[in-house]
Image (cartoon, grey):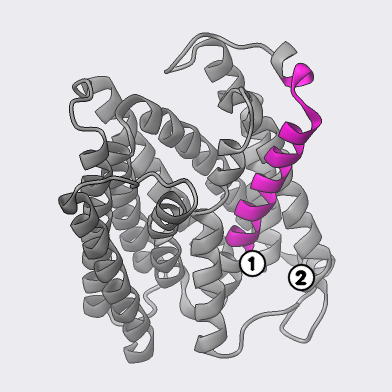
Amino acid sequence: MFVPDTFGLAMLMMITSAVCWGSWANTYKATKGYRFELFYWDYAVGIFLVSLLYAFTLGSSGGGGEGFLANLSAADRGNIVSAMIGGFIFNIANLLLVAGIEMAGLAVAFPVAIGIAMVVGVIMSYALQPKGDALLLGLGVALAIVAVIMDGKAYGRLTKGAQAVSRKSIVVCIVSGVLMGSFAPFVTRALTRGHPLTPYSIAVFFTLAAFLCCFMVNVYFMKKPLVGTPVDFSGFFAARPQDHALGLLGGAIWGTGTVFNFVAASLTGVAISYAIGQAAPMVAALWGVFVWREFAGADAKAKTYLALMFLFYLLALVAIASAYQAG
């Protein structure tokens, strides 16, 4: 299988991961009247199919270890369970994050959910796999959290005068953040314990579990949505073909980022790879600024917050990269 043999290549894969994680939602924005709960079915299929594609290509060629099928037959079954638990947890967290964004807005949901996720994910992953300098990694995470807060403040300037944020929405964001950070330790275990899974195998079982989770959690949210009215499968079958294609594309983009993040983690450790991947809000903000024109006409404070967000993210990337090299 293909694995990075230098930190530079791993860093490129981690940055690509952040770009993918921060970009997939653009496909949903491009749909027309397609409820997110329905879009999510296409998205979940897309993440699983692209993981299989990488498993049978990059994951089955090259001299970096076991190929995908050989790894499936030899790996400890407990690691398969760990990868699937991680995928199940991620899926719930992702659905709650979207609901939190709709309920509280990006200005609240990103700082609360992504900030908590980064702290929980990095600390728990590092405890299982202590790769890199702990102080520099902690500094990098702190800088990234400041960047997320700046991102939230920038979006908050766009929604001045909006209705007060409810306690329910805050709880949803907190739960999403805790769960979003909690999947990383299960990936770490699958990658390091006993006869481990390869990163490509982990991605396949992770995304399979995310898809299967939809039959319970997404169906529940279709019937009892946190935001909006209930929706049924008739809307899925009535959607335009291009909307289904956009959902699959969104899943393929996110899935590519996930595979690359897991593959990079085989060299850097999950804590470092996860932390850099969580630069996704910076990428999402770039899309908002330059493509969706969300900040057209924004006041000087909003633009200052955006500039500070980019600065703190860049400093975070430098600190986290230095943590690997000093470890």
Of residues 215 and 77, the one nearer the viewer is 215
Q: Residue at x 60, y 12 (%)?
A: 231
Q: Residue at x 59, y 59 (%)?
A: 258
Of residues 307 and 144, the one nearer the viewer is 307
Q: Residue at x 68, y 34 (%)?
A: 212
Question: Residue flagged by tag 2: what amino acid is it?
Answer: Gly
Q: Secondary structure at mark 2?
A: helix
Q: Where in the figure is residue 15, as x and y percent of width and height? A: 50, 71
Q: State how many labels appear.
A: 2
Q: Residue 137, can we see it?
A: no
Q: Write the start and end of the magenta stretch as one range.
A: 236-259
Answer whether residue 133 is magenta in the image: no
Of residues 50 and 248, the one nearer the viewer is 248
Q: Eyeballing the image, is 261 above or below 110?
A: below
Q: Which residue is mark 1?
A: 199
Q: Eyeballing the image, is 264 above or below 87?
A: below
Q: Residue 283, can we see it?
A: yes
Question: Residue flagged by tag 1: what amino acid is it?
Answer: Pro
Q: Which residue is mark 2?
A: 59
Of residues 151 and 225, the one nearer the viewer is 151
Q: Where in the figure is residue 53, as x and y percent of width and height? A: 80, 59
Task: State yes or no: discs 1 and 2 in contact (Cβ < 8 Å).
Answer: yes
